[in-house]
Structure formats: structure tokens, C-alpha cells
Image: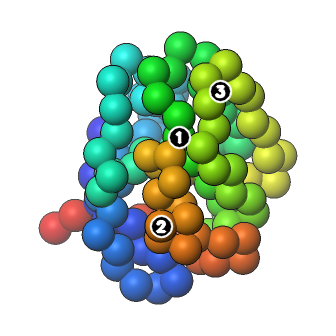
Amino acid sequence: MKHGRLIHRGEESRIGVEVADRSIERMRGLLGRSALDADRALWLEPCNAVHTFGMRFPIDVVFIDKRGCVLSVHCNVSRARMLVCWRARSTLEMRAHAAKALQIEVGDSLEWRASA
């Protein structure tokens, strides 16, 4: 799995990202984890749908288009939910309430940059 930093509105954030760009990594996602640190996130690509069946904790889900523009932000998504955004190319999964804390909003630009 690749690792990097979240870039929000062109600025590097304190959030480290794990990039799931292989099908097996995307299928596993955050399943099996008991928590997600506040300074960590999972970037799934390509991905336009996620589920929280079997999850042990709530998450924030951010759908992003191919240009890196935030299409939608879903906060505090609990267990046994499914979310779809047909126009999304990528999905960012974060600890619940992290999107609000980082002030991620529809229309913002998000990307990830590989760690050096």
C-alpha cells in the first residue's frame, strides 16, 4: 500500500494517507481495524461507492471527482450503511468528525502526495 500526505486546498495537511489503489486493498478498506487515528485517512482509488457493514467505528466519507474536487461529504457514517456517488473517482475515509475539523467542504480540492 502506498503512503502519503493529504493536500487540502493546495496545502499539505497533517493527515497521513494510506492509498488503496489495488482491488484487494480497496475491498479490505478499514475492515478489521478497531479504530482510525485522528491524523490518518484511507484514500481509495478508483472508488465511487463504500459500505460500513462490519465496521467497528463510524467514519467520515468524502467523494472526490477525477479533478480532485470534493463532490460530497458524509459525516459520522455509522455501521451497516452504503454510500454511492456515481461521479466520484476517489473516496477518502477518515475518523468521524475529521472532515469538519479540517473544514473539508464541497468544491474544495483534495489530493494526496507521496511521502518522501
The residues tagged by marks 2 and 1 sit, at their Cα atoms, a distance apart of 13 Å
Q: Secondary structure at mark 1?
A: strand
Query: Which one is earlier in the sequence, the residue at label 1 or at label 3?
Result: 3
Residue 91 picture location, percent across and down: 59, 49
Q: Is residue 59 above or below residue 73?
A: above
Query: Which one is earlier in the sequence, the residue at label 2 or at label 1?
Result: 1
- Residue topped by disc 1: 59
- Residue topped by disc 3: 51
The residues tagged by marks 1 and 3 sit, at their Cα atoms, a distance apart of 11 Å
Q: Secondary structure at mark 3?
A: strand
Whether residue 21 appears in this view of the structure is yes
* Quarter of the image where the N terminus is located: top left
Q: Are marks 2 and 3 in contact (CB under 8 Å)?
A: no
Q: How many marks?
A: 3
- Residue topped by disc 2: 101
Compared across the picture, whether 71 is left or right of 96 comes to: right
Residue 98 picture location, percent across and down: 47, 57
Residue type at numbered disc 3: His
Judged from this view, the residue extending furthest toward the right is 86
Q: 56 or 20: nearer the eye?
A: 56
Residue type at numbered disc 1: Ile
* Quarter of the image where the C terminus is located: bottom left
Q: 64 or 103: nearer the eye?
A: 103
